[in-house]
Image (tube, grey):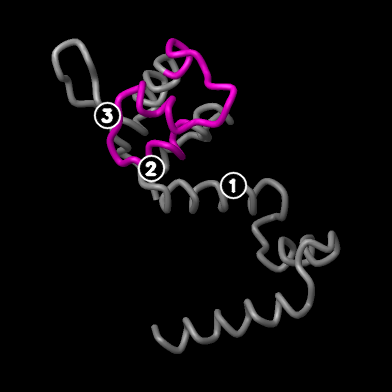
Amino acid sequence: MNTKMKELTRAEEQVMQELWKLEKAFVKELIEQMPEPKPAYNTVSTIVRILEEKSFVAHEAFGKSHRYYPTVNKEEYSRFTAGNLLGKYFDGSVKELLSFFVKDKQVDLKQLDQMLSQIKDENKKS
């Protein structure tokens, strides 16, 4: 994992989600994919430049236009944010995380059993 990776703001994450889907895009194309109300062109353009400074995005120049593409894949960022979540709120314990979701009724015991079965199946394949 990239140890220099930084957490993204909500707006930066929204732009990255669209860029991961599109793989390559001009700012105008990113805006077209976003829900209403659409953000202003300058707002998205600024966010993309910040993402470039954070090394999440790079660009190809087409005259004065830039087509952007992710340099960090979604799985890598997901792993990073999941690790942060575990570390910040659950003392690095997956058990504490699952317990939280069960107590909060976001995961019931049947779902937990299904997850455990899937994990066992994955471990058998490895």
Q: Label 1 to label 3, Cα distance in Å?
A: 25 Å
> In terms of image quadrants, where is residue 52?
top left
Q: Position of residue 89 (x, y in %)?
A: 72, 49
Magenta-colored span: 15-44
Q: Position of residue 29 (x, y in %)?
A: 35, 27
Residue corresponding to mark 2? 20
Relative side of 86 to 38, left or right = right
* Labels 1, 3: front one: 3
For label 2, the SS is: helix
Query: Magenta region, mostly helix, strand or loop?
Result: helix
35 drawn magenta: yes
* Labels 2, 1: front one: 2
The amino acid pointed to by label 3 is Ala
Residue corresponding to mark 3? 58
Q: Label 2 to label 3, Cα distance in Å?
A: 13 Å
Q: Position of residue 58 (x, y in %)?
A: 27, 29
Pointer 2 or 1: first along the chain: 2
The amino acid pointed to by label 1 is Asn
Residue corresponding to mark 1? 84
Check the image and name the residue furthest to the left.
Answer: 63
Front residue of 108/103: it is 108
> In terms of image quadrants, where is residue 124?
bottom left
Query: From the viewer's perspective, is residue 48 above or below residue 115?
Result: above
Front residue of 126/44: it is 44
Instruction: Count neighbours of disc 3 (C-alpha within 10 A) and say few if under 14, some if 14 to 19, many if 20 or more.
Output: some
Instruction: Count neighbours of disc 2 (C-alpha within 10 A) and say few if under 14, some if 14 to 19, many if 20 or more.
Output: some
Query: From the viewer's perspective, is residue 65 above or below residue 102?
Result: above
Q: Residue at x 52, y 18 (%)?
A: 39
Q: Residue at x 38, y 42 (%)?
A: 20
Instruction: Count neighbours of disc 1 (C-alpha within 10 A) and say few if under 14, some if 14 to 19, many if 20 or more.
Output: some
